[in-house]
Amino acid sequence: MTASAPLVIDVTGINKHFGDKHVVRDLSLQVREGEIFGFLGPNGSGKTTSIRMLCGLLTPDSGSGTCLGLDVLTESPAIKRQVGYMTQRFSLWEDLTIAENLAFIARMFGMADRGRVVDEALAGLDLTARRHQLAGTLSGGWKQRLALACCLLHQPRLLLLDEPTAGVDPKARRDFWEEIHRLSADGITVLVSTHYMDEAERCHRLAYLSGGSLLASGTADEVVASQRLHTWEISGPGLQAVTASLRKTPGAELVASFGATLHVSGRNRAALEAGLASRLASTQLTMKPIAPSLEDAFIHLMQSSGQPAND
């Protein structure tokens, strides 16, 4: 993915209501070919609704833009034919084998030479040895791999993945992301929602949503820098006993546990540093400035947004 790559998604002012709930508010987004773009935000922030509008499953109430060069308001059926969409929950047929699930999807897309297509899909994601195994007996990681194989069967140009690694073990998550980066290198664009910070850091660019609004976007470094946070790491004996008082420190906007330490962050460096030094003077705790992490930035965004969940 390069800065000169063509835009696959280019939307402006996209809105969606469900009754009196304004679920997505004036979403503007640009995603380039081959890019892995991460969608982050708390539950109910509008991530899933946004993804469904971009892939043609929902029609926006207003706004404008294109996905794969097609109008998101008027050409939803054509968009759906060129997109692979992986939902949060495993949604394939558990009483069919892996191969039977793939064959059924191939028939749905009206694909010719379905036997060859299924065999290639099985081989591409190392599923050949399990082709006769019932989908319902697979572990979370193998179900995830089957779902991805089904998404790729019709050779989509865009993958939309809605929390695809929820509930799978760390090795399966790592293997999944290796596959995503391989697909990106082949020119497939990926839009993925996730709650995991390590996965967010694997994306080329990120967007953070809260209350249906886009609050921050850019590379991981750009999102962290946009919050203008200064962070100190507090460590030593009796740490939990002073956590409540540290939250009252002048300039402290965020206090969060990180293993055996605390991260205390705020935008007023001088006030926060002086306040922490004063509170820790009579303790055995130590403080040192550190670079704020992506997780620090997202927790700060979540706390400062003050917007209710919508969907």
Image (cartoon, rainbow, N blue to C red):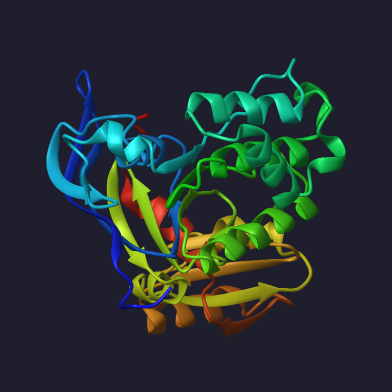
Does residue 85 appear left or right of residue 95 in this picture?
left
In terms of depth relative to the viewer, which is nearer, 84 or 11?
84
Residue at the (75%, 42%) spot, across then down: 141
Q: Quadrant of residue 218?
A: bottom left
| Farthest-out residue, right | 129
Residue 248 in the image: above or below residue 81: below
> Where 50 falls versus 274 (above or below)?
above
Question: Going by the image, does 73 lie left or right of 279?
Answer: left
> Residue at point 47% right, 30% down?
109
From the viewer's perspective, tell me whether residue 131 is left or right of residue 296.
Answer: right
The quarter in which the N terminus is drawn is bottom left
Q: Residue at x 46, y 47 (%)?
A: 156
**From where the camera sits, is residue 166 visible?**
no
Query: Where is residue 56 drawn, in percent x and y?
Result: 31, 35
Residue 244 visible in rendering: yes
Residue 133, relative to residue 81: is it above or below?
above
Counting the numbered discs, the total is 0
**In front: 157, or 272?**
157
Front-lying residue, 287 or 54: 54
Image coordinates of residue 288 in percent, x first then y, are 61, 84
**Quadrant the C terminus occupies:** top left
The image shows residue 39 at horizontal and vertical percentages of 43, 52
Could you tell me which residue is drawn at 29 percent across and 41 percent down?
Answer: 212
Observer-nearest of 151 and 252:
151
Q: Residue furthest top?
A: 95
Q: Where 146 sits versus 132, above or below?
A: below
